[in-house]
Image: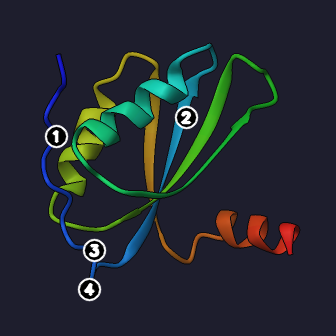
């Protein structure tokens, strides 16, 4: 059976934001979060995931557009068992800029 997804919204005129998630670190957490966004046709511009120092947790940063569906997406992500917290940052958050400088 093929699941039908909603049509993606045009992203023109929307600002970008960074969502920072603290999650339990075990196999499948990243794909579960990405699938949640994909099923709702929500475009993710960038993804970064790194384990934290105690290795039982990881941080995931998602660069997304701030559109009318974002608040609902955050509520859905917060309901996931393995998500410990979600923080929202403006697009000026430096995590993706630092990564881009590293690779150039």
Q: CA distance from mark 3 to mark 4?
A: 6 Å
Callout 2 secondary element? strand
Tell me: 53 left or right of 42. Answer: right
Cβ–Cβ below 8 Å for labels 4 and 1?
A: no
- From the image, tell me which residue sits under label 3: 11
- From the image, tell me which residue sits under label 2: 22
Figure quadrant of the N terminus: top left
Residue 67 higher or lower than 2, as above or below: below
Disc 1: CA contacts within 10 A as few (<14), some (14-19) or many (>=20): few
**What is the quadrant of residue 70 in the picture?**
bottom left
- From the image, tell me which residue sits under label 1: 5
Q: Position of residue 95 (x, y in %)?
A: 68, 63
Tell me: 16 left or right of 102. Answer: left
- From the image, tell me which residue sits under label 4: 13
Disc 2: CA contacts within 10 A as few (<14), some (14-19) or many (>=20): many
Q: CA distance from mark 2 to mark 1?
A: 27 Å
Q: CA distance from mark 3 to mark 2?
A: 26 Å
Residue 56 higher or lower than 68, as above or below: above
């Amino acid at each position: 059976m093929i699941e039908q997804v909603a049509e993606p919204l045009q992203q023109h005129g929307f600002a970008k934001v960074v969502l920072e998630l603290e999650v339990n670190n075990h196999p499948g957490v990243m794909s579960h979060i990405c699938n949640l966004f994909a099923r709702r046709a929500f475009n993710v511009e960038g993804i970064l995931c790194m384990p934290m120092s105690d290795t039982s947790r990881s941080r995931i940063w998602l660069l997304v557009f701030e559109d009318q569906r974002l608040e609902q997406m955050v509520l859905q992500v917060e309901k996931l068992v393995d998500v410990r917290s979600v923080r929202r940052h403006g697009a000026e958050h430096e995590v993706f800029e630092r990564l881009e400088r590293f690779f150039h």
